[in-house]
Structure formats: C-alpha cells, structure tokens
Image (cartoon, helix red, strand yellow):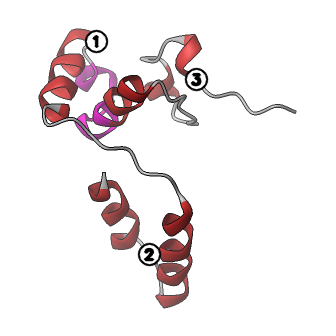
C-alpha cells in the first residue's frame, strides 16, 4: 500500500518532516494487498454505503486489507469507525 505513504509525503511541510516520515515508514510492517483489493473495496463501499457516509474508497481499501490479514485498525475517524465491527477496532490499553 505504498500509495498510502505517498499521501503523507505529499502533505509534508518541510524536509525535516519528510525525513521523519521516511524513517517512520521504514520500520512499519507492510501488507501485501491482493490483486483484487480495489474491486473488493468498491464492493464493500457499495454494500455499506460508505460514500454517502463520508468514507472514501481509499479507507475502504485499508479495511479490506486489514480484514484479509486479520489486523486490527486504529482510527479516530468516527465515520470510518462506524463501518467497522467492534472486534476489528484496536483499543490501546490504558
């Protein structure tokens, strides 16, 4: 999902932030997306009416990839959280 990383680089404010992002993303694990990830994301988006709920296709692709790998998602986006099942949400221990 290198396309996700490109969005962060695009919005970086300066060279220091770009350097931070490169170091940060270098240590994150990656997920191998299936060849039909975007088709599944579109189908899921349609089935939960994500677009009309303010959740974009890119976010739906992340949900599909997480479901394929049984990964939990962490987000503060209430719109995205409304689409996830409770057991799919990562909750940090306090």
Tell me, for residue 48, which label it has, or none.
1
Which percent across, then down, holds residue 58? 27, 40
Is residue 63 inside the magenta stretch? Answer: no
Q: Label 2, secondary structure: give it.
A: loop
Cα separation between marks 1 and 3: 17 Å
Q: Magenta part mainly helix, strand or loop?
A: helix
> What is the magenta range?
50-61
Q: Nearer the viewer, mark 1 or mark 3?
A: 3
Q: Residue at x 30, y 51 (%)?
A: 1
Residue ID for mark 2: 12
Could you say which quadrant of the image residue 42 lies in? Answer: top left
Q: Nearer the viewer, residue 26 or 91?
A: 26
Cα separation between marks 2 and 3: 27 Å
Could you say which quadrant of the image residue 89 lies in? Answer: top right
User: On screen, 44 above or below 12?
Assistant: above
Residue ID for mark 3: 89
């Amino acid at each position: 999902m290198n396309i996700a990383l490109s969005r962060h680089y695009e919005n970086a404010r300066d060279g220091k932030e770009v350097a931070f992002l490169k170091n940060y993303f270098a240590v994150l694990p990656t997920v191998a997306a299936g060849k039909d990830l975007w088709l599944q994301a579109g189908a899921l988006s349609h089935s939960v009416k994500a677009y009309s709920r303010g959740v974009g296709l890119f976010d739906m692709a992340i949900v599909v990839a997480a479901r394929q790998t049984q990964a939990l998602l962490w987000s503060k986006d209430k719109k995205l959280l409304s689409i996830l099942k409770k057991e799919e949400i990562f909750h940090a221990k306090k």
